[in-house]
Image (cartoon, helix red, strand yellow):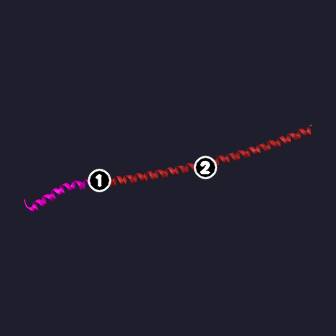
Amino acid sequence: MTKTGITFIAILITTAFSIPVVQADHSYKEAWEARKEQMEQEREFLKRAHELEREERKRLYELEREERKHWEEMNREALKHQEEMFREEFKHREEMAREFRKRY
């Protein structure tokens, strides 16, 4: 065998052994890129879920605030009504007391 033949065979053997390694590295790189993309999508999904949860808490807080305002307003109205009833009752009792004094 000549020097050129030996060199050719050595190149073929080296190429034959290096091709699967390069292919494995390439597939590993593709798998890593796919996993990286998946992790990025998961991160975005979790970020959006957190944002939606925050918006939902904010909406619920606003609803509770509105409900509290409503109940406070209802309580104010009830107190006004009750005070008005007490005033009317007080006036009525005073009138009854005057009537009673006039008679006796």
The furthest residue to the top: 104
Secondary structure of the residue carrying numbered label 1: helix
The residue at which mark 1 appears reads as 28
Quick one: label 2 or label 1, which is nearer the N terminus? 1
Quadrant where the C terminus lies? top right
Q: Residue at x 46, y 52 (%)?
A: 48
Which of 18 and 50 lies nearest the eye of the viewer? 18
The spot of residue 51 in percent (x, y) is: 49, 52
With 6 as the anchor, is 33 left or right in this view?
Answer: right
The spot of residue 77 in percent (x, y) is: 70, 47
Q: In the rendered view, would you say 95 is above or below 50?
A: above
Span of residues in magenta: 1-28
The residue at which mark 2 appears reads as 65
Which of 29 and 75 lies nearest the eye of the viewer? 29
- Residues under labels 2 and 1: Cα distance? 54 Å
Quadrant where the N terminus lies? bottom left
